[in-house]
Image: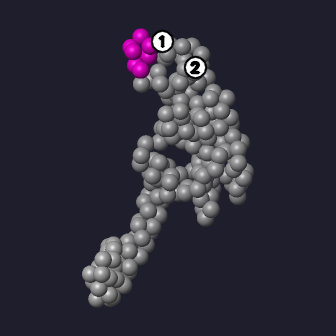
Amino acid sequence: MNVTVQSYLLKENEGLVFDAEEQDAWKRTVEEMGLEGQMKLTRGKDSPIPFLWMNRRLRAVFSFLCPRSEKVVEYGKMPIPLEALSLIALAEKEKYFGEIRVWYDDVKGDPIAVGTAEDKELYLIARWGAENKSLERLEKEARERCEVDTRGALERKAQECKNRLATLDSVVEERMNGGYFYA
């Protein structure tokens, strides 16, 4: 099986990681402008976190696609491709994150590496699998899984309610005797 790797090292931030002059100019400008939020991104290090920040929507997408996770040092489901390992190694070398985990799914492959910053924000480092997929396509797949999951949960709850309605007399009698009622 061919494995492709998608890097989430933002192209516009590469210079802040690999170019000392650009890094210094950025930090100097941020300090001169008093941009405290931007300075927090550096955590006192040389460069800010250069990976894709996972907003609430992106976290939800990958929570559906990759419902399990392990610390990267413990992950052993499939080999991590060299390109993804290089990105993880960069993140560890620069100490961008307190923890790096691999999120995955036992049914479908396509794991992701996710870094957790000191402020508990999550950053997408890399994704690997059989093919490259746009974030839009991944969101569509996650939405389909979410719909199946939600439909199943609602159908189970609806069946429970139908079963309770079928025994309404005994439920009412139980409540009249001080029993607890739950919907």
State the extent of the magenta-drawn residues as a range. 30-36
Q: Position of residue 16 (x, y in %)?
A: 55, 22
Residue at left 33%, top 77%?
A: 179
Asked which secondary structure carries label 2, the reply is loop
Q: Where is residue 68 in the image (x, y as percent from the top left)?
A: 58, 56
Which residue corresponds to mark 2? 46
Position of 17 relative to 76 (above/below): above
The answer to whether the residues at label 2 and label 1 have Cβ atoms under 8 Å apart is: no
Position of 126 relative to 160 (above/below): above
Q: Where is residue 151 in the image (x, y as percent from the top left)?
A: 40, 71
Mark 2 vs 1, N-terminal side: 1
Q: Where is residue 125 in the image (x, y as percent from the top left)?
A: 58, 40
Of residue 38 and residue 176, the one placed in the foreground of this image is 176
The numbered mark at residue 77 is: none
Which residue corresponds to mark 1? 28
* Number of residues whose C-alpha sits closer than 10 Å to that of mark 1, classed few (under 14), some (14–19) or many (20 or more): few
Position of 63 relative to 94 (above/below): below
The amino acid sitting under disc 2 is Asp
Q: Does the magenta stretch include residue 151?
A: no
Asked which secondary structure carries label 1, the reply is helix
Position of 35 relative to 120 (above/below): above
